[in-house]
């Protein structure tokens, strides 16, 4: 199946090289290899994890008349940024490059960017309600997304037992191989326990000092591990929105997982995690394609008023979104922040709701209706 960002990446490759990040096994390699057709049929694919390919990469051995070269997992090479800069600056004018990786490829933005003007950055996300295989109904997809997650292999297979096996194998590769290639972690078992602690806290405020105390590690270590897991696209963190919010809380983040199956909890927690992944996918597309600055936040004040998600684009509050498993009664907190922040849209997503309706400027809807208008179709 064609992925949602595929035509835009193809267009960008005509102008610059493209860096494609995203979680392991989300479909980056499959999509990228699909580019090796048509005008790029004579392109080459080189994987840093393959010994022979790694030597070819280090020695820059590929055909000069090759129109497209795919470099997979090259971020594991410590000096990859300067290496790819040199390759780009000395390339034949009709040759371009696609660099993919299962860790964040935008870390070079810190402290200056020597690659400025040479690349476009894209992030590939799991399948979602607005990106489904032909012939699959949204209702069937929604059930799979809640329990199996949106990664192509378990989602398309539709088998819970196989999905558990796949998830265990993927988790082990990320923790014991990918992280090992980038960081020296003395006690991998403690890191696994740290991830389990986060999985059980989805939808709640994550106080890292409490987790650190439980695991008998330093709070700085817990913070470092959280950033590392973010870098590996295992989870993502959202922070409180505090602008124009009286008595707002300032520090505790929330943590969600790219694989909805990683969430430990009840149906409401799985639903909130699913909504979080859908919203982040939309915001990343708006950033990667349209060039806007986006962020996903939540709101909670010291009086206990809370809204699950706030989408912010170029500093402006666009959406307030509350998520409930079954209760269609409008959240009083949502009403309060609607008047205070005056967003463009105010939505309450209810998992078990047959008929959406509007009331007092708030749309009460279900996930299927809410996510059927993807930004890339506008």
Image (cartoon, rainbow, N blue to C red):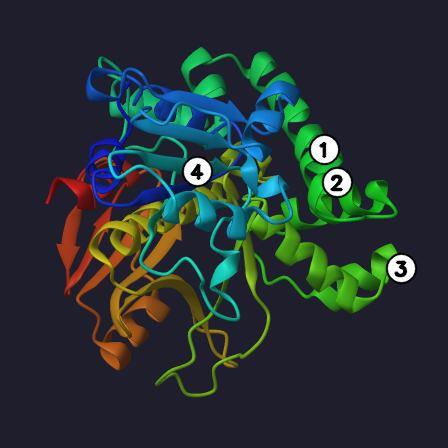
* Mark closest to the chain's N terminus, 2 or 3: 2
Q: CA distance from mark 2 to mark 1?
A: 5 Å
Along the viewing direction, whichever of 171 and 9 lies nearer the viewer: 9
Q: Residue at x 72, y 33 (%)?
A: 177
Q: Residue at x 24, y 41 (%)?
A: 371
Q: Mark 2 against mark 3, which lies toward the viewer?
A: 2
| Labels 4 and 2 touching (C-beta < 8 A) | no
Q: Which residue is labeled 1 in the image?
A: 177
Q: Mark 1 against mark 4, which lies toward the viewer?
A: 4
Q: Mark 4 against mark 2, which lies toward the viewer?
A: 4
* Mark closest to the chain's N terminus, 4 or 2: 4
Indicate the quadrant containing the C terminus: top left, top right, bottom left or bottom right: top left
Say what secondary structure mark 2 lies in.
Answer: helix
Q: CA distance from mark 3 to mark 4?
A: 39 Å
Q: Mark 3 against mark 4, which lies toward the viewer?
A: 4
Q: Which residue is labeled 2 in the image?
A: 180
Q: Position of residue 208 (x, y in %)?
A: 71, 64
Say what secondary structure mark 4 lies in.
Answer: strand
Q: CA distance from mark 2 to mark 3?
A: 22 Å
Q: CA distance from mark 1 to mark 3?
A: 24 Å
Q: Position of residue 47 (x, y in %)?
A: 54, 25
* Mark closest to the chain's N terminus, 1 or 4: 4
| Labels 2 and 1 touching (C-beta < 8 A) | yes
Say what secondary structure mark 3 lies in.
Answer: loop
Q: Which residue is labeled 4 in the image?
A: 99
Along the viewing direction, whichever of 80 and 268 lies nearer the viewer: 80
Where is 12 relative to 203, above or below? above
Question: Any mark on residue 216, and which?
Answer: 3
């Amino acid at each position: 199946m064609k992925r949602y960002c595929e035509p835009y990446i193809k267009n960008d490759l005509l102008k610059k090289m493209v860096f494609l990040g995203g979680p392991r096994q989300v479909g980056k390699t499959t999509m990228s290899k699909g580019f090796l057709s048509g005008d790029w049929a004579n392109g080459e694919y080189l994987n840093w994890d393959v010994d022979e390919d790694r030597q070819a990469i280090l020695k820059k051995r590929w055909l000069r008349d090759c129109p497209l070269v795919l470099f997979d997992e090259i971020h594991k090479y410590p000096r990859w940024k300067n290496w790819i800069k040199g390759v780009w600056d000395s390339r034949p004018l009709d040759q371009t490059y696609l660099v993919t990786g299962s860790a964040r490829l935008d870390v070079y933005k810190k402290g200056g960017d020597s690659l400025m003007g040479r690349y476009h950055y894209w992030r590939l996300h799991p399948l979602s309600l607005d990106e489904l295989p032909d012939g699959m109904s949204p209702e069937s997809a929604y059930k799979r997304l809640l329990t199996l997650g949106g990664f192509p292999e378990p989602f398309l297979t539709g088998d819970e037992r196989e999905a558990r096996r796949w998830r265990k194998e993927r988790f082990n590769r990320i923790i014991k191989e990918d992280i090992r290639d980038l960081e020296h972690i003395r006690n991998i078992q403690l890191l696994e326990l740290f991830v389990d602690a986060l999985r059980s806290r989805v939808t709640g405020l994550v106080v890292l000092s409490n987790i650190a105390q439980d695991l008998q590690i330093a709070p700085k270590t817990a913070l470092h591990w959280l950033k590392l897991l973010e870098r590996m696209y295992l989870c993502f963190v959202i922070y409180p929105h505090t602008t124009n919010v009286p008595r707002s809380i300032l520090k505790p983040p929330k943590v969600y997982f790219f694989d909805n199956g990683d969430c430990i909890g009840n149906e409401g927690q799985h639903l909130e995690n699913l909504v979080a992944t859908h919203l982040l996918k939309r915001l990343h597309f708006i950033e990667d394609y349209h060039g806007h600055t986006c962020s996903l936040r939540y709101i909670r004040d010291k009086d206990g008023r809370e809204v699950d998600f706030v989408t912010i684009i170029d500093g402006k509050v666009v959406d307030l979104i509350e998520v409930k498993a079954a209760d269609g009664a409008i959240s009083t907190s949502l009403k309060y922040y609607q008047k205070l922040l005056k967003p463009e849209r105010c939505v309450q997503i209810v998992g078990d709701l047959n008929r959406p309706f509007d009331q007092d400027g708030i749309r009460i809807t279900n996930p299927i209706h809410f996510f059927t208008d993807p930004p890339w179709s506008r």
